[in-house]
Image (cartoon, rainbow, N blue to C red):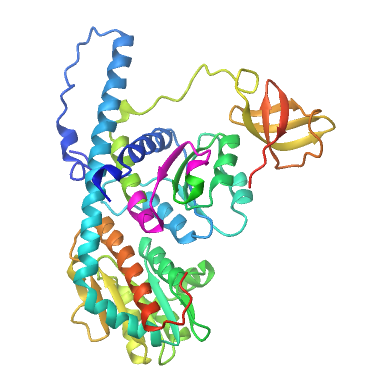
Amino acid sequence: MAAADAPGETLAAAAMAVASRMAQGATLWAVAPGLDDHARHVAVEFLHPVVVGTQALPAVALSGANVIDTARRGCRASDVAVLVGPRTAEFAARCRAWGVVSIALSWGDEASTSSATHIIRLRNEADAVRAYHLLWELTQVCLEHADLLEPTPTDSVCAVCADDAVLGEVAGIDGDQVTLLTPCGVVAADASLVADLAIDDLVLVHAGVVLGKEHRS
Amino acid sequence: MTATDFLYPFLNDDSTAGESASESANERGASIAARRSALLDDLARSAGAKWQASMTATTDAVTANAGALRAAATIVGSAGRVLAAGNGGSSCDADRFLRLLPTNSDQRTVSLTADPAVLTALANDIGVERMFARLVDVYGQPGDALVVFSTSGQSPNLLAALDVARRRGLRTIAFAGYGGGRFIENADVDVAIVVQDSSVHRIQEAQAALVDALVQAVGKVQPGRATR
Protein backbone atom coordinates (compact mmCIF):
# COMPACT_ATOMS: atom_id res chain seq x y z
CA MET A 1 0.00 0.00 0.00
CA ALA A 2 1.39 3.39 -0.94
CA ALA A 3 1.54 6.06 1.75
CA ALA A 4 -1.11 7.98 -0.16
CA ASP A 5 -3.55 5.12 0.50
CA ALA A 6 -3.13 5.30 4.26
CA PRO A 7 -6.34 6.69 5.79
CA GLY A 8 -4.55 9.62 7.47
CA GLU A 9 -7.11 12.32 6.71
CA THR A 10 -10.19 10.36 7.72
CA LEU A 11 -8.45 9.17 10.90
CA ALA A 12 -7.51 12.74 11.86
CA ALA A 13 -11.04 14.05 11.30
CA ALA A 14 -12.54 11.16 13.26
CA ALA A 15 -10.07 11.66 16.13
CA MET A 16 -11.04 15.34 16.34
CA ALA A 17 -14.71 14.34 16.60
CA VAL A 18 -13.98 11.71 19.27
CA ALA A 19 -11.76 14.07 21.31
CA SER A 20 -14.24 16.95 21.08
CA ARG A 21 -17.06 14.85 22.49
CA MET A 22 -15.02 12.96 25.08
CA ALA A 23 -13.70 16.28 26.42
CA GLN A 24 -17.39 17.08 27.11
CA GLY A 25 -17.86 13.82 29.05
CA ALA A 26 -18.98 11.44 26.30
CA THR A 27 -18.58 7.69 26.71
CA LEU A 28 -17.08 5.69 23.84
CA TRP A 29 -18.94 2.52 22.79
CA ALA A 30 -17.08 -0.09 20.75
CA VAL A 31 -18.96 -2.53 18.53
CA ALA A 32 -17.63 -5.15 16.11
CA PRO A 33 -20.36 -7.60 15.06
CA GLY A 34 -18.89 -11.09 14.75
CA LEU A 35 -15.45 -9.73 15.66
CA ASP A 36 -15.92 -9.01 19.37
CA ASP A 37 -12.19 -9.18 20.07
CA HIS A 38 -11.75 -5.95 18.09
CA ALA A 39 -14.50 -4.20 20.10
CA ARG A 40 -12.82 -5.19 23.38
CA HIS A 41 -9.44 -4.05 22.07
CA VAL A 42 -10.79 -0.60 21.16
CA ALA A 43 -12.42 -0.16 24.57
CA VAL A 44 -9.38 -1.24 26.60
CA GLU A 45 -7.18 1.02 24.49
CA PHE A 46 -9.16 4.12 25.51
CA LEU A 47 -9.97 3.04 29.08
CA HIS A 48 -6.52 1.81 30.11
CA PRO A 49 -3.96 3.41 27.78
CA VAL A 50 -0.54 1.83 27.34
CA VAL A 51 1.25 5.18 27.18
CA VAL A 52 1.97 6.53 30.66
CA GLY A 53 0.51 9.99 31.27
CA THR A 54 -2.19 9.84 28.60
CA GLN A 55 -5.82 10.29 29.56
CA ALA A 56 -7.88 7.27 30.59
CA LEU A 57 -11.31 7.72 29.00
CA PRO A 58 -14.67 6.02 29.61
CA ALA A 59 -15.10 3.27 27.01
CA VAL A 60 -17.28 0.17 26.88
CA ALA A 61 -17.17 -2.79 24.49
CA LEU A 62 -20.52 -4.22 23.47
CA SER A 63 -20.56 -7.83 22.39
CA GLY A 64 -22.92 -10.68 21.80
CA ALA A 65 -26.02 -11.03 19.67
CA ASN A 66 -28.04 -8.04 20.90
CA VAL A 67 -25.62 -5.12 20.76
CA ILE A 68 -28.31 -2.71 19.54
CA ASP A 69 -30.61 -3.47 22.49
CA THR A 70 -27.70 -3.18 24.92
CA ALA A 71 -26.53 0.07 23.35
CA ARG A 72 -30.03 1.57 23.50
CA ARG A 73 -29.93 1.14 27.29
CA GLY A 74 -26.45 2.65 27.59
CA CYS A 75 -25.78 5.25 24.89
CA ARG A 76 -26.56 8.90 25.58
CA ALA A 77 -26.99 11.51 22.87
CA SER A 78 -23.57 13.03 22.10
CA ASP A 79 -21.78 9.79 23.06
CA VAL A 80 -19.36 8.26 20.56
CA ALA A 81 -19.39 4.83 18.89
CA VAL A 82 -16.45 3.13 17.20
CA LEU A 83 -17.70 0.45 14.82
CA VAL A 84 -15.31 -2.16 13.44
CA GLY A 85 -15.95 -4.54 10.57
CA PRO A 86 -17.97 -5.12 7.42
CA ARG A 87 -21.39 -5.40 9.13
CA THR A 88 -21.98 -2.18 11.07
CA ALA A 89 -24.42 -0.22 8.84
CA GLU A 90 -27.45 -1.11 10.98
CA PHE A 91 -25.70 0.12 14.13
CA ALA A 92 -24.53 3.29 12.35
CA ALA A 93 -28.13 4.08 11.35
CA ARG A 94 -29.29 3.63 14.97
CA CYS A 95 -26.50 5.98 16.07
CA ARG A 96 -27.94 8.64 13.75
CA ALA A 97 -31.33 8.35 15.43
CA TRP A 98 -29.82 8.35 18.92
CA GLY A 99 -27.63 11.41 18.27
CA VAL A 100 -24.49 9.31 18.74
CA VAL A 101 -21.44 10.22 16.64
CA SER A 102 -20.18 7.07 14.93
CA ILE A 103 -16.76 6.21 13.53
CA ALA A 104 -16.83 3.20 11.18
CA LEU A 105 -13.58 1.32 10.53
CA SER A 106 -14.92 -0.59 7.55
CA TRP A 107 -13.94 -2.86 4.76
CA GLY A 108 -16.06 -4.62 2.16
CA ASP A 109 -19.12 -3.31 0.33
CA GLU A 110 -20.77 -1.65 3.31
CA ALA A 111 -18.06 1.01 3.62
CA SER A 112 -19.58 2.92 0.72
CA THR A 113 -23.19 2.86 2.00
CA SER A 114 -22.76 3.27 5.76
CA SER A 115 -24.47 6.22 7.40
CA ALA A 116 -21.69 6.50 10.00
CA THR A 117 -20.59 10.06 10.78
CA HIS A 118 -16.97 9.26 9.88
CA ILE A 119 -16.00 6.34 7.66
CA ILE A 120 -12.43 5.06 7.60
CA ARG A 121 -11.97 2.64 4.73
CA LEU A 122 -9.60 -0.25 5.28
CA ARG A 123 -8.42 -2.88 2.83
CA ASN A 124 -9.25 -5.78 5.14
CA GLU A 125 -9.48 -7.04 8.70
CA ALA A 126 -5.68 -7.06 9.11
CA ASP A 127 -5.64 -3.23 8.99
CA ALA A 128 -8.12 -2.84 11.84
CA VAL A 129 -5.65 -2.97 14.76
CA ARG A 130 -3.39 -0.39 13.09
CA ALA A 131 -6.39 1.86 12.41
CA TYR A 132 -7.76 1.95 15.95
CA HIS A 133 -4.31 2.36 17.48
CA LEU A 134 -3.81 5.48 15.33
CA LEU A 135 -7.33 6.69 16.13
CA TRP A 136 -6.43 6.48 19.83
CA GLU A 137 -3.08 8.26 19.35
CA LEU A 138 -4.60 11.10 17.33
CA THR A 139 -7.46 11.46 19.83
CA GLN A 140 -4.96 11.90 22.66
CA VAL A 141 -3.10 14.58 20.71
CA CYS A 142 -6.36 16.43 19.96
CA LEU A 143 -7.29 16.32 23.67
CA GLU A 144 -4.06 18.16 24.47
CA HIS A 145 -5.13 21.01 22.20
CA ALA A 146 -8.28 21.82 24.14
CA ASP A 147 -8.67 25.24 22.51
CA LEU A 148 -8.84 23.63 19.06
CA LEU A 149 -11.57 21.07 19.78
CA GLU A 150 -14.79 21.34 17.80
CA PRO A 151 -17.45 23.38 19.60
CA THR A 152 -20.71 21.70 20.58
CA PRO A 153 -23.37 22.92 18.16
CA THR A 154 -25.51 25.63 19.79
CA ASP A 155 -28.62 27.49 18.54
CA SER A 156 -29.31 24.49 16.29
CA VAL A 157 -32.74 24.27 14.71
CA CYS A 158 -34.59 21.04 15.38
CA ALA A 159 -34.20 19.09 12.16
CA VAL A 160 -37.48 17.26 12.76
CA CYS A 161 -39.35 20.54 12.33
CA ALA A 162 -37.05 22.01 9.72
CA ASP A 163 -35.87 21.29 6.20
CA ASP A 164 -34.10 17.97 6.64
CA ALA A 165 -35.59 14.52 6.83
CA VAL A 166 -33.83 12.63 9.61
CA LEU A 167 -33.71 9.08 10.97
CA GLY A 168 -35.82 8.38 14.03
CA GLU A 169 -36.37 5.27 16.10
CA VAL A 170 -39.87 4.46 17.30
CA ALA A 171 -39.99 4.55 21.11
CA GLY A 172 -43.76 4.70 21.65
CA ILE A 173 -46.99 4.28 19.63
CA ASP A 174 -50.41 5.75 20.42
CA GLY A 175 -52.71 5.34 17.42
CA ASP A 176 -51.37 7.56 14.66
CA GLN A 177 -49.12 9.44 17.07
CA VAL A 178 -45.63 8.10 17.73
CA THR A 179 -42.78 9.09 20.01
CA LEU A 180 -39.41 9.03 18.28
CA LEU A 181 -35.79 9.12 19.32
CA THR A 182 -34.11 11.51 16.88
CA PRO A 183 -30.83 13.44 16.62
CA CYS A 184 -32.65 16.38 18.28
CA GLY A 185 -34.03 14.38 21.17
CA VAL A 186 -37.37 12.74 21.90
CA VAL A 187 -40.10 14.15 19.66
CA ALA A 188 -43.74 13.43 18.88
CA ALA A 189 -44.67 12.82 15.25
CA ASP A 190 -47.67 11.97 13.11
CA ALA A 191 -47.44 8.45 11.68
CA SER A 192 -50.77 8.30 9.83
CA LEU A 193 -48.99 7.81 6.48
CA VAL A 194 -47.27 4.59 7.55
CA ALA A 195 -48.89 1.27 8.41
CA ASP A 196 -47.61 -1.46 10.75
CA LEU A 197 -45.07 0.53 12.73
CA ALA A 198 -43.48 -1.29 15.64
CA ILE A 199 -41.37 -0.23 18.58
CA ASP A 200 -37.67 0.11 17.61
CA ASP A 201 -38.45 0.52 13.88
CA LEU A 202 -36.22 3.03 12.14
CA VAL A 203 -38.22 5.65 10.23
CA LEU A 204 -37.60 8.74 8.15
CA VAL A 205 -39.26 11.79 9.70
CA HIS A 206 -39.70 15.27 8.22
CA ALA A 207 -41.47 18.30 9.67
CA GLY A 208 -43.13 16.21 12.37
CA VAL A 209 -44.48 13.61 9.93
CA VAL A 210 -43.21 10.05 9.57
CA LEU A 211 -42.62 9.54 5.85
CA GLY A 212 -41.83 5.84 5.83
CA LYS A 213 -39.92 2.95 7.31
CA GLU A 214 -36.20 2.89 6.75
CA HIS A 215 -35.55 -0.55 5.30
CA ARG A 216 -32.07 -1.85 5.82
CA SER A 217 -30.74 -5.01 4.30
CA MET B 1 5.79 18.96 27.70
CA THR B 2 2.67 16.85 27.44
CA ALA B 3 2.29 13.09 27.49
CA THR B 4 2.00 12.63 23.75
CA ASP B 5 4.87 14.94 22.76
CA PHE B 6 7.02 11.95 21.96
CA LEU B 7 4.31 10.63 19.62
CA TYR B 8 3.94 13.88 17.69
CA PRO B 9 6.95 16.12 18.51
CA PHE B 10 6.32 18.51 15.60
CA LEU B 11 3.28 19.87 17.44
CA ASN B 12 5.54 21.75 19.85
CA ASP B 13 6.45 24.08 17.04
CA ASP B 14 3.70 26.58 17.90
CA SER B 15 3.98 29.22 15.20
CA THR B 16 0.64 30.79 16.17
CA ALA B 17 1.69 31.79 19.69
CA GLY B 18 1.53 35.43 20.72
CA GLU B 19 -1.71 36.49 19.07
CA SER B 20 -2.77 40.05 19.63
CA ALA B 21 -4.93 40.63 22.69
CA SER B 22 -7.04 43.13 20.75
CA GLU B 23 -8.12 40.47 18.28
CA SER B 24 -11.90 40.48 17.77
CA ALA B 25 -14.01 37.43 18.57
CA ASN B 26 -14.55 36.73 14.88
CA GLU B 27 -10.85 36.90 14.13
CA ARG B 28 -10.21 34.66 17.10
CA GLY B 29 -12.79 32.17 15.78
CA ALA B 30 -11.21 32.24 12.34
CA SER B 31 -7.78 31.83 13.88
CA ILE B 32 -8.92 28.81 15.89
CA ALA B 33 -10.52 27.25 12.79
CA ALA B 34 -7.27 27.81 10.87
CA ARG B 35 -5.17 26.33 13.65
CA ARG B 36 -7.54 23.34 13.95
CA SER B 37 -7.24 22.82 10.21
CA ALA B 38 -3.43 23.02 10.44
CA LEU B 39 -3.46 20.52 13.31
CA LEU B 40 -5.63 18.10 11.29
CA ASP B 41 -3.26 18.44 8.31
CA ASP B 42 -0.28 17.66 10.54
CA LEU B 43 -2.08 14.70 12.14
CA ALA B 44 -3.14 13.31 8.75
CA ARG B 45 0.43 13.50 7.44
CA SER B 46 1.88 11.99 10.59
CA ALA B 47 -0.71 9.18 10.67
CA GLY B 48 0.03 8.40 7.01
CA ALA B 49 3.74 8.13 7.75
CA LYS B 50 3.13 5.97 10.82
CA TRP B 51 0.78 3.74 8.85
CA GLN B 52 3.48 3.17 6.25
CA ALA B 53 6.18 2.57 8.87
CA SER B 54 3.92 0.06 10.62
CA MET B 55 3.28 -1.81 7.36
CA THR B 56 7.03 -2.08 6.73
CA ALA B 57 7.84 -3.14 10.31
CA THR B 58 5.08 -5.74 10.11
CA THR B 59 6.46 -7.27 6.92
CA ASP B 60 9.95 -7.33 8.45
CA ALA B 61 8.66 -9.09 11.59
CA VAL B 62 7.00 -11.83 9.52
CA THR B 63 10.21 -12.37 7.52
CA ALA B 64 12.39 -12.44 10.65
CA ASN B 65 10.11 -15.04 12.29
CA ALA B 66 9.74 -17.38 9.30
CA GLY B 67 11.42 -20.32 11.05
CA ALA B 68 9.58 -19.78 14.33
CA LEU B 69 6.24 -19.56 12.50
CA ARG B 70 6.88 -22.90 10.76
CA ALA B 71 7.71 -24.52 14.10
CA ALA B 72 4.65 -22.95 15.74
CA ALA B 73 2.39 -24.12 12.89
CA THR B 74 3.56 -27.70 13.42
CA ILE B 75 2.75 -27.48 17.14
CA VAL B 76 -0.67 -25.90 16.61
CA GLY B 77 -1.49 -28.23 13.72
CA SER B 78 -0.86 -31.34 15.79
CA ALA B 79 -2.30 -30.12 19.11
CA GLY B 80 -5.41 -31.65 20.68
CA ARG B 81 -6.83 -28.44 22.08
CA VAL B 82 -5.37 -24.99 21.57
CA LEU B 83 -5.50 -22.72 24.65
CA ALA B 84 -4.77 -19.01 24.30
CA ALA B 85 -4.34 -16.15 26.74
CA GLY B 86 -3.10 -12.59 27.15
CA ASN B 87 -3.73 -9.50 29.29
CA GLY B 88 -5.66 -6.42 28.12
CA GLY B 89 -5.35 -5.77 24.38
CA SER B 90 -3.22 -8.90 24.11
CA SER B 91 -6.20 -10.99 25.30
CA CYS B 92 -8.05 -9.61 22.26
CA ASP B 93 -5.13 -10.66 20.06
CA ALA B 94 -5.30 -14.13 21.62
CA ASP B 95 -9.05 -14.33 20.90
CA ARG B 96 -8.50 -13.07 17.36
CA PHE B 97 -5.96 -15.88 16.83
CA LEU B 98 -8.49 -18.49 17.98
CA ARG B 99 -11.21 -16.90 15.83
CA LEU B 100 -9.06 -17.07 12.69
CA LEU B 101 -7.50 -20.48 13.36
CA PRO B 102 -8.53 -23.07 10.80
CA THR B 103 -9.79 -26.07 12.72
CA ASN B 104 -10.48 -29.63 11.72
CA SER B 105 -13.20 -31.75 13.19
CA ASP B 106 -10.88 -33.18 15.85
CA GLN B 107 -9.53 -29.96 17.23
CA ARG B 108 -11.00 -27.52 19.76
CA THR B 109 -9.96 -24.13 21.01
CA VAL B 110 -10.32 -22.57 24.46
CA SER B 111 -9.84 -18.89 25.30
CA LEU B 112 -8.60 -18.47 28.85
CA THR B 113 -10.14 -14.98 29.03
CA ALA B 114 -13.60 -15.77 27.67
CA ASP B 115 -15.55 -15.81 30.91
CA PRO B 116 -15.65 -12.81 33.28
CA ALA B 117 -17.23 -14.94 36.03
CA VAL B 118 -14.32 -17.39 35.96
CA LEU B 119 -11.66 -14.67 35.66
CA THR B 120 -13.02 -12.49 38.46
CA ALA B 121 -13.51 -15.52 40.70
CA LEU B 122 -9.90 -16.58 40.20
CA ALA B 123 -8.55 -13.01 40.42
CA ASN B 124 -10.45 -12.43 43.64
CA ASP B 125 -9.68 -15.75 45.32
CA ILE B 126 -6.19 -16.76 44.19
CA GLY B 127 -4.89 -13.57 42.53
CA VAL B 128 -4.18 -12.44 38.99
CA GLU B 129 -0.70 -13.99 39.03
CA ARG B 130 -2.11 -17.52 39.33
CA MET B 131 -5.32 -17.19 37.32
CA PHE B 132 -4.01 -18.40 33.96
CA ALA B 133 -1.86 -21.08 35.60
CA ARG B 134 -4.99 -22.40 37.32
CA LEU B 135 -6.89 -22.48 34.03
CA VAL B 136 -4.07 -24.33 32.26
CA ASP B 137 -4.18 -26.81 35.12
CA VAL B 138 -7.96 -27.23 34.65
CA TYR B 139 -8.20 -27.33 30.85
CA GLY B 140 -4.75 -28.48 29.73
CA GLN B 141 -3.92 -32.06 28.82
CA PRO B 142 -0.76 -33.62 27.42
CA GLY B 143 -0.69 -32.98 23.67
CA ASP B 144 -2.54 -29.66 23.92
CA ALA B 145 -0.91 -26.35 23.02
CA LEU B 146 -0.81 -23.09 25.01
CA VAL B 147 -0.35 -19.88 23.00
CA VAL B 148 0.32 -16.71 25.02
CA PHE B 149 0.42 -13.09 23.85
CA SER B 150 2.37 -10.32 25.53
CA THR B 151 4.04 -7.14 24.35
CA SER B 152 6.61 -7.01 27.16
CA GLY B 153 7.36 -10.70 27.51
CA GLN B 154 7.31 -10.09 31.27
CA SER B 155 3.73 -10.81 32.38
CA PRO B 156 3.99 -12.86 35.60
CA ASN B 157 0.63 -14.58 35.05
CA LEU B 158 1.68 -15.76 31.58
CA LEU B 159 5.07 -16.94 32.85
CA ALA B 160 3.24 -18.91 35.56
CA ALA B 161 0.88 -20.39 32.94
CA LEU B 162 3.83 -21.46 30.77
CA ASP B 163 5.41 -23.15 33.79
CA VAL B 164 2.26 -25.18 34.51
CA ALA B 165 1.86 -25.99 30.80
CA ARG B 166 5.38 -27.41 30.72
CA ARG B 167 4.72 -29.57 33.76
CA ARG B 168 1.45 -30.88 32.32
CA GLY B 169 2.95 -31.85 28.96
CA LEU B 170 1.53 -29.08 26.77
CA ARG B 171 3.55 -27.55 23.95
CA THR B 172 3.93 -23.78 24.24
CA ILE B 173 4.17 -20.80 21.88
CA ALA B 174 4.86 -17.29 23.20
CA PHE B 175 4.42 -14.00 21.34
CA ALA B 176 6.38 -10.99 22.68
CA GLY B 177 7.82 -7.64 21.71
CA TYR B 178 10.73 -5.75 23.27
CA GLY B 179 13.13 -8.35 21.88
CA GLY B 180 11.24 -11.18 23.61
CA GLY B 181 11.65 -10.34 27.29
CA ARG B 182 11.56 -13.36 29.59
CA PHE B 183 9.91 -15.52 26.93
CA ILE B 184 13.21 -16.12 25.16
CA GLU B 185 15.81 -18.53 26.50
CA ASN B 186 12.98 -19.85 28.66
CA ALA B 187 12.82 -23.61 29.21
CA ASP B 188 9.00 -23.41 29.41
CA VAL B 189 8.68 -21.94 25.89
CA ASP B 190 8.95 -24.23 22.86
CA VAL B 191 8.67 -21.45 20.27
CA ALA B 192 9.06 -17.71 20.85
CA ILE B 193 7.74 -15.36 18.18
CA VAL B 194 9.51 -12.07 18.77
CA VAL B 195 9.01 -8.50 17.56
CA GLN B 196 12.07 -6.25 17.84
CA ASP B 197 10.22 -3.06 18.77
CA SER B 198 9.47 -1.12 21.95
CA SER B 199 6.17 0.54 21.07
CA VAL B 200 3.22 -1.45 22.41
CA HIS B 201 1.05 -0.41 19.47
CA ARG B 202 3.59 -1.23 16.78
CA ILE B 203 4.29 -4.58 18.49
CA GLN B 204 0.60 -5.51 18.49
CA GLU B 205 0.23 -4.49 14.84
CA ALA B 206 3.15 -6.78 13.95
CA GLN B 207 1.68 -9.54 16.14
CA ALA B 208 -1.62 -9.29 14.23
CA ALA B 209 0.28 -9.95 10.98
CA LEU B 210 2.27 -12.75 12.64
CA VAL B 211 -1.03 -14.36 13.68
CA ASP B 212 -2.27 -14.11 10.10
CA ALA B 213 0.94 -15.79 8.90
CA LEU B 214 0.63 -18.49 11.58
CA VAL B 215 -2.96 -19.42 10.74
CA GLN B 216 -2.01 -19.55 7.05
CA ALA B 217 0.90 -21.85 7.89
CA VAL B 218 -1.38 -24.07 9.99
CA GLY B 219 -3.65 -24.35 6.94
CA LYS B 220 -0.64 -25.56 4.93
CA VAL B 221 0.54 -28.20 7.40
CA GLN B 222 -3.09 -29.38 7.73
CA PRO B 223 -4.47 -28.92 4.20
CA GLY B 224 -7.86 -30.43 5.08
CA ARG B 225 -8.70 -27.62 7.44
CA ALA B 226 -11.31 -25.02 6.73
CA THR B 227 -9.73 -21.59 6.67
CA ARG B 228 -11.95 -18.82 8.00
If the image is split into quadrants, where does the N terminus of chain B sit? top left
Q: Position of residue A203 (x, y in %)?
A: 68, 35
Residue found 23% across the figure and 41% down from its top? B46
Residue found 41% across the figure and 24% down from its top? A151
Q: Position of residue B72 (x, y in %)?
A: 31, 80
Is A23 rendered above or below residue B82? above
Please state the extent of the stretch shown in magenta in the rendering.
Answer: A112-131
Judging depth in this view, the residue of A110 and A179 nearest the camera is: A110
State left or right for residue A82 relative to residue B156.
right
Judging depth in this view, the residue of A21 and B216 nearest the camera is: B216
Would residue B131 be seen by someone viewing this image from the given angle?
no
Is A120 rendered above or below residue B141? above
Would residue A140 be seen by someone viewing this image from the given angle?
yes
Is A210 rendered above or below residue B75? above
Residue found 32% across the figure and 88% down from its top? B166
State left or right for residue B55 relative to residue A34.
left
Q: Position of residue A86 (x, y in %)?
A: 49, 52
Residue found 34% across the figure and 76% down from its top? B217
